[in-house]
Image: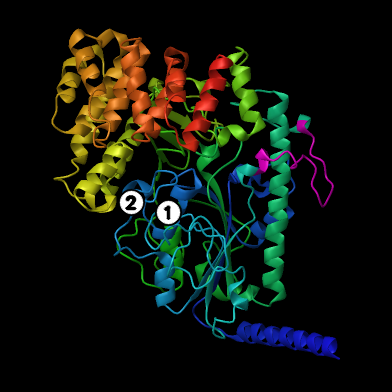
């Protein structure tokens, strides 16, 4: 009898839910529901509807045929946490101080997040389940999330009404209250390649993807491990396609498709090496598909569904657009362009992108993309794109690729990843979708290069790019003046951006004739200028290594290790001297002390760059008190020395 009662109650509950959804379907309110489905680590090129002929993605393809596929959507940061900081704020991570992967830098409390504005406008907002926003505000201290109503990658307080999967089922939502639901699924995170249990056979359909049929990017060598990771990842994307279909079916079954705008966007590109984390199209070109019901036809970007929209869209355009089409207030600080609805703004000419520290690996790069060309400025060209990064190297294809390169089997294209970079790169993405033919030195493209270089600089000035102070120096200055990075870089007395940009240009483009001007930077009272002077001499190398320069660099090694405002200069000078084979013992002591005392990730990056030139540092570090992460890095370094890497 009790069992029958429970079953009856369950059936009654389901009927009541069905009735409420049916009632909502009849309402013709002006506020649309929005379901935003995000997929991790999915470059647009991995989907059938974006032209991939090697994969079956029927749910994505059908969804695109019912909506609008944006062919030119780009993330402003090619890795999850910085990218999502731009999504939640509508502000460039380089303008906010959140461009560093897994940072917890505070942002000004006055800045409004887009869920705040939706809630103020009467929306019920929910997020399933990733909250990787890369700043400390509202983040519960010591809490990484993962529990009920907590999200993952940090529990952010007073941001979402709930962390459930389907907001419309939540009992806290009032009947007919519009909802904004984020569902973080329908993607394939790079960790998929780290687990050997994930094979090239789809677990449900039993479809096996043949590695030999994979079409590799031009920059990837044709080796078995690479082909297998392509095949395995293809299966992962097919699983994401199944996830998308399940979510859309749920919305349809609950009778809400006609009231709900559905958005799909990948958080950046991915995931085989040289995609995620990098400013090439493989890392930044993201899927964006939007399905808008007939009742909201006034929002359609075209008269017909199923069309391809070639308008340039940046990730920071999205929150501003969602607020606009829901009738919510748009904070003046948001930097994007509204691309749908009555408040639609002029299409942007460029998408601006930035990359800084990725996990433990430092590197400053900026990029700008129009509808065809990609320009990348490398501010630390002495750092190869293929710096060893522990998480990336978990993929079998990465280890195999590096070994293939060290065996001398790569060519100019497949081996470029492991070599120093040019200061400037220009790619014709229409003719060269893999971004391997650098046109920066081609006189036929001189005007294009100049235009994009100037546009990038103008944008950096406009948004106050924080990257001209290396990370530890920036954090030290922020702490000294007791203000968030966002405010610091907007205060000329504390951050002279134009002067720093000029110093960076001098450092990156210097010839031997500029050595005197660079030496003046080394003697500046401003530590930022001293840093760029050091980078400049790295660029000039042995040719400019005069006794005065060597003395100045050796002096930098002896600065106070706990002075974080000069720590980056200290370890960069160590790299300079180490590459020249000078002051070896002092270089080893400087880098080891910077690692143990100051926990400098830049020091670790420089240790890996120097490799066998300072192999004695392994013994020094072994005798020091290391934290667990540093022990892991030391073990990797020792292994690479053993294998002559």
Q: CA distance from mark 2 to mark 1?
A: 9 Å
Question: What element does badge 1 sit on?
Answer: helix
Residue 438, numbered circle: none
Residue 367: x percent and y percent?
40, 37
Q: Residues within 10 Å of mark 2 (few under 14, many from 20)?
A: many
Tell me which corner region of the image, top left, top right, bottom left or bottom right, holds residue 270. Answer: top right
- The residue that disc 2 covers is 96
Residue 578: x percent and y percent?
36, 15
Instruction: Kindly indicate whether the residue at mark 1 contacts the one at mark 2 (C-beta within 8 angstroms).
Output: yes
Please state which of residues 49 and 461 is positioned toward the viewer in this rendering: 461
- Check residue 198 for magenta coloring: yes
Residue at x-position 42% and y-position 70%: 158
Q: The magenta stretch spans which residues?
A: 192-211
Residue at x-position 80% and y-position 42%: 201
Q: Is residue 137 above or below residue 284?
A: below
The answer to whether residue 171 of the structure is visible from this angle is yes
Residue 597: x percent and y percent?
34, 33
Query: Position of 512 compared to 520: left or right?
Result: right
- Check residue 466 for magenta coloring: no
Question: What element does badge 2 sit on?
Answer: helix
- The residue that disc 1 covers is 85
Residue at x-position 83% and y-position 45%: 207
Tell me which corner region of the image, top left, top right, bottom left or bottom right, holds residue 626. Answer: top left
Classify the position of the N terminus by image quarter. Answer: bottom right
Please state which of residues 571 and 70 is positioned toward the viewer in this rendering: 571
Tell me which corner region of the image, top left, top right, bottom left or bottom right, holds residue 568. Answer: top left
């Amino acid at each position: 009898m009790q069992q029958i009662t429970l079953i009856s109650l369950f059936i009654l509950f389901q009927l009541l839910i069905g009735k409420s959804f049916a009632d909502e379907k009849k309402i013709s309110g002006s506020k649309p529901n929005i379901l935003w489905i995000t997929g991790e680590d999915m470059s647009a090129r991995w989907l059938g509807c974006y032209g991939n002929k090697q994969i079956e993605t029927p749910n994505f393809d059908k969804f695109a045929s019912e909506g609008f596929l944006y062919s030119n959507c780009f993330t402003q940061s090619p890795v999850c946490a910085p990218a999502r900081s731009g999504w939640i704020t509508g502000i460039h991570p380089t303008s906010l101080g959140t461009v560093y992967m897994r940072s917890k830098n505070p942002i000004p409390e006055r800045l409004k997040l887009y869920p705040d504005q939706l809630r103020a406008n009467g929306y019920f907002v929910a997020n399933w389940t990733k909250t990787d926003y890369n700043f400390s505000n509202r983040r519960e201290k010591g809490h990484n999330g993962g529990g009920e109503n907590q999200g993952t990658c940090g529990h952010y307080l007073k941001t979402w009404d709930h962390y459930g999967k389907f907001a419309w089922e939540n009992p806290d939502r009032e009947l007919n209250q519009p909802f904004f639901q984020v569902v973080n699924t329908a993607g394939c995170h790079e960790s998929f390649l780290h687990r050997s249990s994930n094979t090239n056979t789809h677990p449900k359909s039993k479809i096996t993807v043949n590695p030999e049929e994979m079409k590799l990017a031009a920059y990837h060598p044709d080796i078995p491990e690479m082909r297998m990771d392509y095949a395995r990842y293809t299966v992962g994307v097919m699983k994401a396609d199944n996830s998308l279909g399940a979510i859309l079916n749920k919305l349809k079954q609950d009778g809400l498709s006609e009231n709900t705008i559905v958005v799909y966007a990948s958080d950046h590109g991915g995931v085989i090496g040289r995609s995620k984390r990098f400013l090439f199209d493989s890392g930044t070109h993201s899927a964006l598909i939007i399905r808008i019901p007939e009742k909201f036809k006034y929002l359609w970007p075209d008269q017909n569904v199923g069309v391809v929209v070639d308008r340039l869209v940046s990730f920071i355009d999205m929150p501003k657009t969602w607020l606009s089409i829901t009738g919510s207030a748009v904070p003046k600080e948001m930097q994007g362009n509204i691309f749908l609805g009555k408040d639609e703004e002029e299409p942007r000419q460029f998408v601006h992108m930035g990359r800084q520290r990725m996990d433990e690996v430092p590197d400053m790069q900026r990029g700008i993309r129009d509808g065809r060309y990609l320009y990348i400025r490398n501010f630390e060209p002495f750092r190869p794109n293929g710096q060893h990064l522990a998480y990336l190297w978990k993929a079998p294809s990465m280890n195999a690729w590096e070994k293939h390169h060290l065996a001398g089997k790569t060519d100019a294209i497949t081996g470029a990843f492991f070599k120093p970079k040019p200061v400037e790169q220009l790619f014709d993405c229409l003719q060269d979708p893999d971004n391997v033919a650098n046109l920066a030195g081609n006189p036929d493209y001189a005007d294009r290069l100049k235009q994009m270089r100037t546009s990038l600089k103008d944008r950096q000035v406009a948004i106050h790019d924080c990257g001209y102070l290396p990370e530890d120096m920036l954090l030290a200055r922020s702490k000294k003046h007791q203000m968030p990075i966002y405010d610091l870089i907007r205060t000329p007395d504390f951050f002279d951006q134009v002067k720093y940009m000029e110093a960076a240009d001098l450092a990156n483009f210097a010839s031997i004739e500029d050595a005197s001007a660079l030496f003046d930077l080394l003697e500046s009272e401003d530590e930022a200028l001293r840093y760029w002077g050091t980078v400049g001499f790295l660029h000039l190398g042995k040719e400019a290594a005069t006794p005065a320069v060597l003395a100045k660099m050796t002096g930098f090694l002896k600065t106070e290790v706990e002075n974080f405002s000069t720590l980056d200069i200290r370890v960069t000078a160590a790299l300079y001297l180490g590459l020249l084979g000078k002051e070896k013992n002092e270089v080893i002591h400087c880098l080891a002390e910077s690692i143990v005392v100051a926990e400098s990730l830049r020091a670790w990056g420089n240790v890996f760059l120097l490799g066998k030139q300072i192999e004695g540092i392994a013994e020094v570090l072994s005798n020091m008190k290391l934290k667990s992460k540093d022990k892991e890095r030391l073990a990797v370094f020792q292994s690479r020395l053993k294998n002559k890497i």
